[in-house]
Amino acid sequence: MELNVSTSSQGGHTVVTATGELDLYTAPRLQAALADLPDDAADRITVDLSGVEFCDSTGMNVLLAAMQRVRDGGGSFALAAPRTAVRRILQVTGLDTVFTVVDAAPVPGVG
């Protein structure tokens, strides 16, 4: 399965939406999208995982590296709406205490 990635920004908050499977073969697509965010879009980043059906360690490493880069720059980084399988990986690895996990991605123009 493929991974589709889209980005929307408004008011200093960027939402990166991923759908499909996040694994060894598709993780570079998400990594590139996160790396290509302009510096002014890196204040608040939320990665919407509601459409991700599977995530392996490669995907988690991409998310960890992006979170570290954003936080090192003084920004905030959150994961939104991970499905049960992805949430389980976060819990088993203890990463649910490392990442900020929210129930839903912010809607552009609201809030």
Image (tube, rainbow, N blue to C red):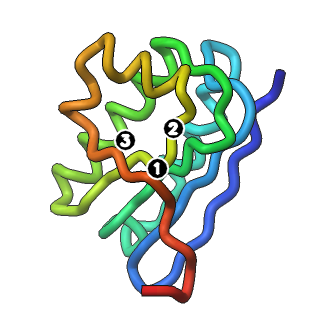
Tags 1 and 2 in contact by the CB under 8 Å rule?
A: yes
Image coordinates for residue 53, horizontal then vertical, percent? 67, 27
Estimate how packed mark 3 is, as few (under 14), some (14 to 19) or many (20 or more) residues with alpha carbons within 10 Å: some
> From the viewer's perspective, is residue 84 above or below residue 101?
above
Image coordinates for residue 85, horizontal then vertical, percent? 55, 20
Provide the secondary structure element on which disc 3 rests: helix
Report whether 24 appears left or right of 89.
right
Q: Which residue is painted at 30% across and 43% down in the image?
A: 67
| Quarter residue 32 falls in | top right
> From the viewer's perspective, is residue 103 above or below residue 27?
below
User: What residue is disc 2 on?
Assistant: 82
Compare marks 3 and 1 and give the one earlier in the sequence: 3
Given residues 104 and 26, the one toward you in this image is 104
User: What residue is disc 1 on?
Assistant: 80
User: What residue is disc 3 on?
Assistant: 66
Tags 3 and 2 in contact by the CB under 8 Å rule?
A: no
Q: Which residue is painted at 62% across and 25% down in the image?
A: 22
Q: Which residue is painted at 33% across and 33% down in the image?
A: 65
Check disc 2 and give the amino acid type. Pro
Of the two numbered discs 3 and 2 in the rendering, the one whose residue sits closer to the viewer: 2
Tags 3 and 1 in contact by the CB under 8 Å rule?
A: no
Check disc 1 and give the amino acid type. Ala
Q: How far apart are marks 1 and 2 (CA)?
A: 6 Å
Q: Which residue is painted at 42% across and 86% down in the image?
A: 111
Provide the secondary structure element on which disc 1 rests: strand
